[in-house]
Image (spheres, grey):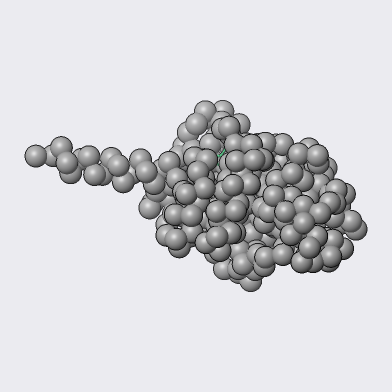
Amino acid sequence: MRKNQVKEKILSGGTAYGVFCNLYSPMIVELVGHIGFDFALLDAEHGPAEVESCEHMVRAAESVGLPVFIRVAMNIRQNTLRYLDIGALGLMLPMINTKAEAEAVVKAVKYPPQGIRGLAAVRAADYGLTISLKEYTIQANQEILVISQVETVAAVNNLDELLSVEGIDVFFIGPTDLSTSMGYVAQASHPEVQAMIDKTVRRIRAAGKAAGTVAYTHEALAQAKERGFQFIVHGVTAMMTKSGRDYLEIARSS
Ligand code: 3PY
Ligand code: MG
């Protein structure tokens, strides 16, 4: 099984930069790798991505040595294992609000003894041909990155309990859903939302855990770095929009 350089980087105190890929193209994933990002994060929560389209993107990512993580829609063991079986090096679970929900995530993602992920000779295990399945379970439990989203007031209220769950590697703040949950619908830049994010990331870091978030602009990136986020995610659509609009501004300015 491939080593997870991103997990290694984050756990040793470094910061990894990736791209949310919500356009379902293997070629975009290759580009993200060639540009030099540390990882791709496929989005199978929002939008139409299914296991099969993700598999093509995982294969494309592997061709350029790029680790891939996938945000799945919900923590159903029978569903999450399919995204791991195709070769994702980690999963991100949205709206995890309680300790029990976070523990269930770890259980679904890990093989015994830590969890209950079902085992078969799947693509991620090289179909059982280059590595024994038993060895694969050990490596997978070690390498797979588990990301739990903190994006509701409930999650913030239960943060201490969430942070105590063994096996969650990154706590990922989702500004859009968090602002909406706070009553400021889609107002991530509202001062109260920003204050909440600031406080939450401090608590995550004080607990010795890694924090992640999205940063779609240069300003957001600088702020995320300053706040000590270690898993920072740009977006394919944000990149295209910015460069396209900048280009047209110059094109039509005279
Ligand atoms: C959110 O902002 O709600 C996310 O999940 C990340 O974009
Ligand atoms: Mg969200």
Q: Nearer the viewer, residue 249 or 158?
A: 249
Vertical order, 164 against 51 (above or below): below
The answer to whether any part of residue 45 appears in the image is: yes
Vertical order, 129 against 179 (above or below): below
Q: Which residue is drawn at the image coordinates 76% and 39% (left, top)?
A: 79
Q: Nearer the viewer, residue 230 or 113?
A: 113
Q: Which residue is drawn at the image coordinates 58% and 59% (left, top)?
A: 62
Q: From the top left corner, tell me how far across and down residue 170 is, in percent.
A: 66, 55
Is residue 83 found left or right of 40 in the rendered image?
right
State the image quarter where residue 150 is shown.
top right
- Which residue appears farthest toward the bottom when viewing the image? 12
Q: Nearer the viewer, residue 45 or 50?
A: 50
Vertical order, 134 against 96 (above or below): below
Is residue 242 found left or right of 53 in the rendered image?
left
Vertical order, 122 against 73 (above or below): below
Q: From the top left corner, tell me how far across and down residue 183 is, in percent.
A: 56, 28
Q: From the top left corner, tell me how far across and down residue 97 is, in percent.
A: 73, 39
Q: From the top left corner, tell me how far across and down residue 241 is, in percent.
A: 35, 40
